[in-house]
Image (tube, rainbow, N blue to C red):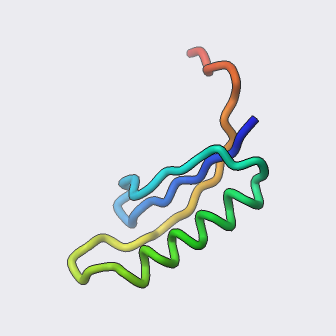
């Protein structure tokens, strides 16, 4: 299974999603680096980074 991360804004909109990481630590590290880059290069009128979420992809889709 692979891990992914999402970076979300203060209004809970998705700013970035990336996946395919072998471990949860690798996903966290990459997410923190991307969030830091986004924060440092943020134009004044853009929404700010609020949350980083890390999850695990499953091989079978969830059925409802």
Q: Residue at x 62, y 21 (%)?
A: 62
**Quadrant where the C terminus lies?**
top right
| Foreground of the two, 14 or 21 | 21
To which quarter of the image does residue 16 belong?
bottom left
Residue 26, percent from left and from top: 73, 59
To which quarter of the image does residue 46 belong?
bottom left
In this view, the residue farthest toward the top is 63
Q: Residue at x 37, y 81 (%)?
A: 41
Placement of 56 over or under 29, stated as above or below? above
Q: Residue at x 59, y 15 (%)?
A: 63
Relative horizontal placement of residue 60, taking residue 40 as reference (left or right): right
| Foreground of the two, 63 or 2 | 2
Relative horizontal placement of residue 6, taking residue 30 as reference (left or right): left
Relative horizontal placement of residue 58, taking residue 51 as reference (left or right): right
In this view, the residue farthest toward the left is 45
Total marks in image: 0
Residue 40, percent from left and from top: 42, 84
Q: Residue at x 52, y 78 (%)?
A: 36
Residue 12, percent from left and from top: 39, 56
Placement of 23 over or under 36, stated as above or below? above
Residue 23, percent from left and from top: 78, 51
To which quarter of the image does residue 43 belong?
bottom left
**Quadrant where the N terminus lies?**
top right
Placement of 39 over or under 4, stated as above or below? below
């Amino acid at each position: 299974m692979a891990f992914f991360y999402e970076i979300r804004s203060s209004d809970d909109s998705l700013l970035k999603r990336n996946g395919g990481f072998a471990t949860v630590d690798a996903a966290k590290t990459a997410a923190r680096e991307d969030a830091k880059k986004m924060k440092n290069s943020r134009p004044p009128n853009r929404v700010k980074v609020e949350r980083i979420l890390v999850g695990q992809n499953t091989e079978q889709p969830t059925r409802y």
